[in-house]
């Protein structure tokens, strides 16, 4: 008979959801695909080693200041990519693209129409056509009339249906609004560890053969990895008191409706659900768990995994586009680069351990510092364009475009507004092709009023 402790990592999962208040748990609903993770709680126990009249070194071991940090390497997929950048940069207003089914309508790019108290902008000019593509920040009625507000086109256009085809999520550095915090559940297949107040400090593109990954460095404000049961009372609902010697706010990491499991060595497990949370170390459940009143242990158990995924971004469907400005780069012909070319965005914390203030062993907050971006490119060296740009300090921008979907309708777009490099000319080596290995850093661009930004075009009109 198989030992129930033998679990392959692929039976686990990572799930996340946006918190209303940083550090206050919400049950995760978005399940992602990952390659590996190293997010852990570090208890940082301290040895007390005073003079106490004995040759033993340690008198006692004391609780330390906890930190919660590590890396998660996620598959770069359009829907969950937006969730990842949401805990790294500040989310802007989503722009939704709708395809309207019309009858022989005329409309020109840039014209605006209203329906359902929402303004829609024409994306592609049509003439006596039956399909109209428009963008907006809200949804139209299921059918009805589009009324022109500005531009060139029919004064009214009747549509029989409207389909939300893609959604564009913008993310930027902000001096006034911090990124969102997430609750993140990591399942090993049988035990779930939960982290609250999770944010990213760094996201880097990596490559696994043709598949693209997002390596995310994350920190959290707290965690729940289970707790000993102190007592169980009542006859339904049952009141469960947890040992809070080390963490007086255990239940601040739990949510009503959470799936929990009770375990005692040598005994069968019992599955239950959190019915209510009464204080920092007490919950109730309607399941009879009275047998675990002495020596029992309670932890989160896995949810049923449910995905809402699109095909991932691929290296073969990635374009690096350079131009004199970000706008020019967006419309430029791609420069085909060698494998190993990559980008990294950094918006670090004062400390990855968080601000360890008085009153709690957990960090109080994750204080953001300054943002920066790096771009490493490797390409065949033929013309001295890179050297020319370096010697006359010409501004260069880059837009990295990762595509997915049958018609490349989904995209993860990294815009870096002003690149700077000290090494444009390659070093030569015997029996080796001459490549430019350029490590770009970035500076703030006053003309564009930004250093870098991210846009994710996907198939979801909401972020959980």
Image (cartoon, rainbow, N blue to C red):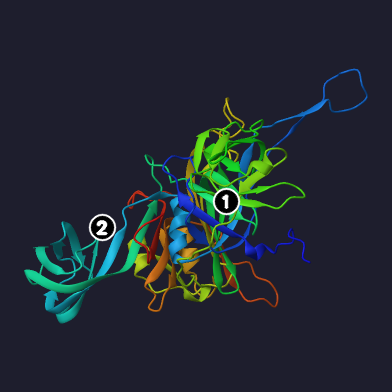
Image quadrant in which the N terminus is located: bottom right
Q: Is residue 317 visible?
A: yes
**Where's residue 328, x and y in %?**
34, 65
Name the element at disc 2.
Answer: loop
Residue at (51, 73) in percent of width and height: 314
Q: Give the image location of residue 130, x and y in percent.
A: 17, 80
- Rendered view: 277 above or below 211: above
Secondary structure of the residue carrying tag 1 is strand
**Res 34 → quadrant:** bottom right
Could one spot residue 350 in this view of the protein? Answer: no
Check if mark 2's residue and mark 1's residue have beta carbons within 8 Å.
no
Reading the image, the residue beneath label 2 is 137
Q: Locate residue 322, reporting x and y percent.
A: 42, 66
Could you say where residue 443 lies in the image, as x and y percent from the top left?
Answer: 44, 50
* Closest to the observer, 252 or 391: 252
Q: Which residue is mark 1?
A: 217
User: Depth check: 405 or 330 in front?
Assistant: 405
Q: Is residue 179 left or right of residue 55?
A: left
Name the residue furthest left. Answer: 155
Question: Looking at this rendering, what residue extends furthest in the front direction?
Answer: 235
| Residue 394: mark in rendering | none
- Mark sitting earlier along the chain (2/1): 2
Image side of residue 175 versus residue 202, left or right:
left
């Amino acid at each position: 008979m198989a030992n129930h402790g033998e679990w392959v990592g692929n039976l686990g999962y990572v799930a996340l959801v946006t918190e209303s208040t940083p550090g206050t748990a919400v049950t995760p609903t978005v399940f992602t695909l990952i390659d590996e993770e190293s997010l852990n709680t570090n208890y940082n126990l301290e040895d007390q080693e005073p003079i106490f009249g004995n040759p033993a070194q340690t008198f006692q071991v004391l609780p330390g200041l906890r930190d919660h940090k590590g890396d998660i390497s996620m598959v770069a997929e359009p829907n969950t990519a937006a969730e990842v950048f949401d805990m790294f940069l500040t989310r802007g207003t989503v722009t939704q693209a709708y395809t309207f089914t019309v009858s022989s309508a005329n409309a020109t790019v840039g014209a605006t129409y209203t329906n359902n108290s929402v303004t829609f902008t024409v994306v592609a000019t049509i003439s006596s056509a039956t399909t109209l593509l428009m963008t907006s920040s809200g949804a139209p009625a299921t059918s009805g009339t589009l009324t022109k507000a500005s531009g060139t086109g029919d004064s009214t256009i009747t549509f029989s249906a409207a389909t939300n085809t893609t959604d564009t999520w913008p993310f930027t550095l902000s001096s006034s609004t911090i990124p969102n915090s997430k609750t993140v559940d990591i399942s090993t297949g049988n035990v779930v560890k939960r982290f609250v107040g999770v944010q990213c400090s760094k996201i880097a593109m990596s490559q696994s053969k043709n598949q693209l990954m997002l390596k995310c460095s994350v920190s959290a404000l707290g965690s729940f990895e289970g707790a000993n049961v102190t007592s169980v009372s009542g006859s339904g609902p049952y009141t469960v008191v947890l040992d809070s010697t080390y963490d007086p706010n255990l239940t601040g990491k739990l949510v009503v409706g959470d799936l929990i499991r009770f375990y005692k060595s040598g005994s069968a497990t019992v599955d239950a659900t959190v019915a209510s949370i009464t204080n920092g170390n007490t919950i109730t459940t309607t399941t009879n768990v009275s047998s675990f009143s002495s020596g029992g242990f309670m932890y989160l158990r896995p949810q049923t995994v449910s995905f809402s995924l699109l095909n991932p971004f691929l290296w073969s469907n990635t374009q690096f586009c350079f131009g004199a400005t970000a706008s020019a780069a967006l419309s430029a012909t791609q420069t085909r680069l060698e494998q190993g070319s990559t980008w990294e965005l950094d918006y670090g914390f004062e400390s990855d351990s968080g601000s360890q203030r008085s009153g709690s062993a957990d960090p109080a907050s994750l204080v953001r510092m300054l943002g920066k971006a790096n771009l490493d490119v490797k390409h065949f060296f033929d013309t001295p364009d890179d050297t020319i740009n370096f010697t006359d300090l010409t501004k260069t921008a880059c837009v990295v475009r990762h595509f997915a979907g049958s018609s490349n309708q989904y995209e993860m777009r990294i815009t870096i507004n002003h690149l700077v490099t000290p090494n444009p000319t390659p070093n030569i080596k015997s029996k080796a092709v001459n490549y430019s290995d350029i490590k770009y850093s970035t500076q703030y661009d006053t003309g564009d009023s930004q250093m870098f930004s991210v846009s994710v075009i996907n198939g979801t009109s909401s972020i959980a």
